Amino acid sequence: APAMPRPGAAPLLCLLQLLSLLEPPAADSLLQLPAPQNVTIYSNNYQNLLRWAPVKLDNGSVLYTVQSRTGADNRWVEMNCTNITKTECNFTHPDNKSYWTITLRVRAELGQVKSDWVETNKFVADQNTIIGPPVIVNVDSTPDSLFLSFLPPVNKNTLQYLVRYWEKSTNEQHETQWTKNTRTGLLNLKQLTVYCFQIRAKVQVLLNENIGPLSETYCHKTAASDATRAGFVVVIFVVATVTVVILAIVCFLFTQKFNQVVKYWFQPPFNIPEHIKEYLKDPDMPVLEELQNNCAEEDLWDSLSVVSNTEGSQTLIRGTLNTNVLSDSRSIESEKT
């Protein structure tokens, strides 16, 4: 008789089978790899990249292969991106092929196991690349114009340029004509006025055009004319002259009005010599003999007035000090008597 499974073994067997289905298959047991996802072309100034999301496996390292074909040839050809580990491929082509229509495809590979191909949309570099804005390197200013010099974003003969400009104090915008020159002029401007401007580039291929974004905003001021500069010189001279005259008048009036104050503040202070102060404190001290010994014969003379208060009366002593100390002594003695 066949063996009967033990009770509870059937649910356990089912659980093991379910877990085996959830586990990722080993690399050698795969019949086909998942295809790459998010396959996208990025192109900026004719630098072209194909990028995609990586295919993740627990075992093994996935490789990728990229192929291309043109609109004139329906055959897929290998590129320089065969059996690569990176998830991007640079397919920048020469300038003379920038108008070609190209289609790309990529697949994942692991040994003999391969994924499906994933194709991109048709790509034309002249139409689909993003043309960056030119870079302004110099601005020459005149009274009525600004001349801009700039560098192209990419070295290509079919590039054309346009400048959008406006007066900084207004919102009225103007645009130049498209030109291939890398130096252009903004004409009929106001002198001594600040103008702001932006510049952009485009590629014209037959009836199709690829216009790039505007650059950052630049601002520059126009110059002054010769007549305006001469007027500034005259105005500055007149203002300086008037200022000097006004300051001179103010100083003169101030001096006349506050003459005594000015003299008081600017004349040197009068200080009584120390030996005179000592004599005034004690008239009996022999200061005259000291003066006679210390005074030189060539000393100049000066007048001195001494006012002293005594008990109940005020005595005025006037004396003259000169090189003859003896005569001064007699004069002071006579006044004291």
Image: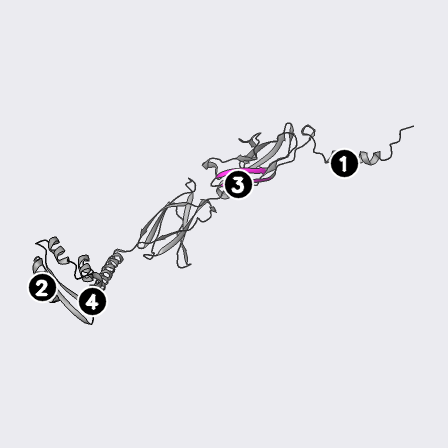
Mark 1 secondary-structure assignment: helix
- For the residues labelled 2 and 4, the Cα–Cα distance comes to 35 Å
Residue 86, x across and y down, in percent? 56, 33
Asked if the residue at tag 1 contacts the one at tag 4, i.e. Cβ–Cβ closer than 8 Å, the answer is: no
Q: Give the amino acid type for the residue marked by disc 1 in the picture.
A: Leu
The circle on residue 331 is 2
Residue 183, x across and y down, in percent? 36, 46
Give the quadrant of residue 158.
top left
Whether residue 51 is visible to the viewer of this picture, yes or no, is yes
Asked if the residue at tag 3 contacts the one at tag 4, i.e. Cβ–Cβ closer than 8 Å, the answer is: no
Give the quadrant of residue 122.
top right
Residue 179, x across and y down, in percent? 39, 47
Between discs 2 and 1, the one toward the N terminus: 1
The circle on residue 42 is 3
**Span highlighted in magenta in the image:** 38-52
Q: Which residue is mark 4?
A: 260
